[in-house]
Image (cartoon, helix red, strand yellow):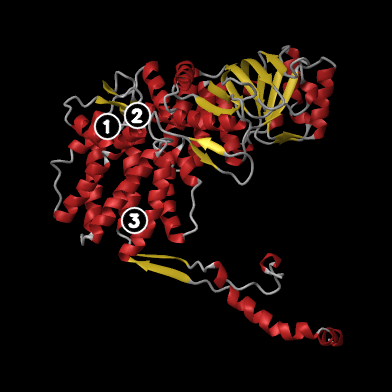
Amino acid sequence: MRKFVGLVSKYPLMKTCAPMLSYSVGRSFATGKDIRFSIEARQLILDGCDKLADAVQLTLGPRGRNVVLDKSYGSPKITKDGVTVAKDISFSNNFMNIGASLLKDVASKANDEAGDGTTTATILARHIFKEGCKSVAAGMNPMDIRRGIQQAVNAVVENLKKMSIPVKGKEEIQNVATISANGDENIGRLISSIYEKSGKDATVTVSDGKTMNTEVEYVEGLRFDRGYISPYFITNPKTAKVELENPKILLVDKKISNIQSILHLLEHCVKSNQSLLIICEDLDSEPITTLVVNKLRGELRICAVKAPGFGENRKETMEDIAISCGAQLISEDVGMQLDKTQPTVLGSAKQVIVTKDDTIIMHGAGNKPDVANRIQTLKDLREKTTSTYDKDKLGERIGRLTGGVALIKVGGTSEVEMAELKDRINDALCATKAASEEGILPGGGVALLNASKSLEKLKGKNFDHNHGIEIIQKACLVPCKAICNNAGFEGSVIVDKLLEEKDSNIGFDAALGKKVNMIEAGIIDPTKVVRCAIVDASGVASLMITSESVIADEVKPEKDKKPTPGTPPNLSLIHI
C-alpha cells in the first residue's frame, strides 16, 4: 500500500487526472438516438433506396452496364450481378443506410430462393415503396394500402403460374442460361451441354481455372473429397494416383485401431486375388504400417481413405456409398462388430481412382432400384427442409448418387475478368435450376406486363385498398421500362404499345430494338425467378410503407466530438 501511495505522490499529474479519467470513461458508454417521424422519416429511407436502386438498375437487360466496386484489399471488382452491387453499398447517413439495408434484404432473399432476379426485385421494391410514401403523405391508410398490395400480388402469382410453360428440351435450357448470363451464348451452350449429359439433378461446381478458356470437367461415378491416407498406396507413380480394378470396398463408421479386426477380410481378398478399398473414420499408425508393408511387398493391392464429411453428415454419406456399391456399412449402432463380420459385407465397383485430394468410385455394384429409392428419399428431404445448408448438402448427395458431377473451370486474362464471368455463370446455373423446377415465361419483363392486365378487374374493399392494387399494377411495368431505358429506347412508349398487343408472347427485344415473339426468340425467364422477385419486393416494401417513426444512432459532427482521454493530440491540426 505504501508503494502505491508513493507512486501517486511522485507523479502529481496522475493524481489530478484520475477522478476525471474515471468520469470520462463512464460517460463514453452513453449513445444518443436520433428519432424521425412521419413524412421526414420515410423520405430519408427513400433517399437511400433511390440511390441503391439507381446503381443496381443500370445492370438490367441485354444492354445493361457494369458496375465497378472498390475493395479495401486487392483489385476492384467489375460485375453486372444485382445482389453483388447492392451488398457493397452503404451510406454515412444512418437513415439512408436503413433504406439501403432493407433493399439489400430483398435482393438477398430473391438470390437465396431463386438464385437470380435480384435486380428486378430491387427496382420493384423501390417503386412500391416510393408510390406508397406518396399515398400515405396524401392521407391514405397505410394498412389498407398494404392489404391491397398483398391481394394484387396473390393475383399476379396465380396469373404467372397459369402462363408458365414446362421446360422440355436442351434449346430452352440454353435460352434460359443465355438470358441470365446477359446474352452470353457461350455460357448458355456450356450449361445446356452439362444438363444434357449429366441430367437435371447434376451437381455443378464453379471454380477458378488455370487457363485462358473456360472448361468443363465431367466426373462419372461417385466422387467425394477425401484422398489416400498414405502416398505409399500409389499404384501409378506417373500420375500419383491409386488405380484399383474391380476392387472390394469396406465401409466402417469408426476408427480402425487394430489390424486384427480386419485381418480375416484381408485374407479373403488375398485368396480371391482382389484389391481392397477401405473407407473409415480414421486408421491408427499400426494398421496403416501393416497395410503399407503388405502393399510394398506386392502381397496385397489396397488403399485406405478417410470418410467424407463430418458428424451426422458423414454417416449418411457413407450409407449413400454403401447403397451405391452394394456394401453394408459396419456400424456399432446396429450391433455390428468389425472383427466378426463376414466377407458378404464388402461391396464392389468396376474401378476406383484415388488421388491425394479425392476418390472416384466408378460403376458401383449396388442394386439400381435401391439406388433410385435412395435418390427419391433425398429429394423428398430436400423439398421439406428449410435450411439452406441442408439443401446444399442433400443436393451434393443426390449428385453423387446420380453420377452427374460437373466442374466448370472459369478462365480469363485477369482475376477481375474471371470474377465477373464467374458471377454470370453462377446466375445462369441458378436460373436454369429454377426453370427446371417451375417452368418458364416470356422474358424482358413481358410476363409481369401481361400479369398487370389481370389486375384491371380486381377490386378491393375501399378506396385505399384499390390504390394498393393500382401500385402493384404500375410496378409490374417497371422492369420492362428499365430494360428499354438501359438500351436507349423510350420505355414508357414501348410499354404502352406492348399493352395493346393481344398475343401475350409478344415483347420488345432490347438487343435488336424490335418487337418479337419472346418464346420463339429464346428470350425467356424462369417462373420461379419472376415469382420470387414480386413476392419478396412487395413483402418488404409494403412493411416499409407502414413505418411511422425511425430510430437510429445519433451521429455527431467531427467538431463536436471530444478527444478520448489518453489519446495523443493530432499534430496535423496544430499550426505554428
Q: Position of residue 395 (x, y in %)?
A: 49, 31
Q: Are marks 1 and 3 in contact (CB under 8 Å)?
A: no
Residue depicted at 67% across the width and 16% down the height:
247
* Nearer to me, 496 or 306: 496
**Residue tagged 3:** 544
- In the image, what residue type sits under mark 3? Met
**Residue tagged 1:** 447
Label 3, residues with CA under 10 Å away: few <14, some 14-19, many ≥20: many
Q: Position of residue 161 (x, y in %)?
A: 26, 33
The mark nearer the N terminus, 1 or 3, is: 1
- Using the rendered view, name the quadrant where residue 57 is placed: top left
Residue depicted at 37% across the width and 28% down the height:
435
- Using the rendered view, name the quadrant where residue 73 is placed: top right
**Distance of label 3 from label 2 (alpha carbons):** 28 Å
The mark nearer the N terminus, 3 or 2, is: 2
Q: Position of residue 126 (x, y in %)?
A: 34, 48
- In the image, what residue type sits under mark 2? Asp
**Residue tagged 2:** 525
Residue depicted at 52% across the width and 71% down the height:
31
Badge 1 marks a residue whose secondary structure is helix
Q: Are marks 1 and 2 in contact (CB under 8 Å)?
A: yes
The mark nearer the N terminus, 1 or 2, is: 1
* Nearer to me, 233 or 366: 233
